[in-house]
Image (spheres, rainbow, N blue to C red):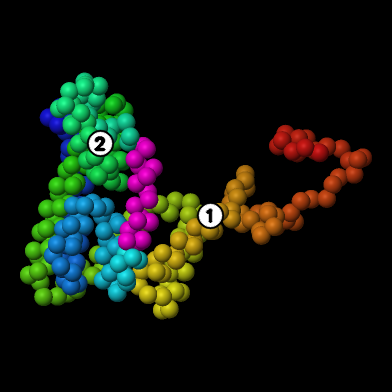
Amino acid sequence: MRILWRTASPALLRDVGLVCLADGIVAVSFGATCVGGGLAWWVPVALSVLVFAGGSQIAAVGVVLAGGSPVAAVLAGAVLNTRLVPYGFAVADVVGPAGPADTGGSAVAIVRRWLARMLGPHVITDESVAFTLRQDSPERRRSAFWACGVSLFVFWNVAVLLGVVLGSAMRNTNAFGLDATFPAVMLALALPTLTSRPTRIAAGTGAVIAVALTPVLPAGLPLLAALGGLATRWNGWRDRDGWHPRGPWGDRGRSGGGPAGPQPARDDGDAADPKELSAGGKR
């Protein structure tokens, strides 16, 4: 571990510290809101130690505080955590010990390797993966991953515990605006991903579904039903003119207002258009 910290650059440690400070503020709000909402003090603490996924923790607790069932809360958190699967593949080369310990056959080396393999996936977060992928060498990738992952784990759990203490001392956490923390954090997580038109359409469709079903479904279920917005991404196609909706029978509309669907065959006497041939089309 000392080798990893020596390999980390001062700039990396500075950036990790800033991220820990920002996440710590969210963690304090999370702990205070949980206790202020009526949950036992050990619930946010146990979630932070065992789950350690800020977005999933916030989503699950938000469902419970809104009156949803524990099953809906678990499903909401699990859906958000699916993004960690590709993250694991992206940092698979740095999760675990480096150097001779990897190939050593001693009992100490084996225990060390298994501990690293067990703890490494637990500290995979958006931030630790982002810092890891920015590095250009295996040593720096490993240092960035462990420095960020371990620091965030410690800061997050300490901040959640501090939030629990503050929440227990407050009579009304809503007076401090902490009830708006969960929606604000989820919005902050979603906004950077809305970079393309199909994604924005899918997100907007999901939001409409959730709002429409909120009056008729128990708390937590509208959030899961909002996944139906993903269907709009499956019914689209992209060509050189941009994104267009695909009709139910596969017909493709043209952006210029031209006719949709397959065009009638040309007469045998018509000459081939060079532009069509250059575009790869067959007569």
Range drawn in magenta: 74-90
Q: Quadrant of residue 187?
A: bottom left
- Residue beneath label 1, please? 233
Circle 1 — which element? helix
Residue at 11% over, 58% down? 161
Mark 2 vs 1, N-terminal side: 2
Above/below status of 125 relative to 171: above
Majority secondary structure in the magenta region? helix
- Residue beneath label 2, please? 117
Q: Quadrant of residue 118?
A: top left
> Looking at the figure, which quarter contains the C terminus?
top right
Q: Looking at the picture, which amino acid does disc 2 mark?
A: Arg
Residue at 24% over, 53% down? 51
Above/below status of 190 relative to 5: below
Residue at 29% over, 73% down? 66
Q: How many marks?
A: 2
Q: Looking at the picture, which amino acid does disc 1 mark?
A: Arg
* Residue 271 seen in render: yes
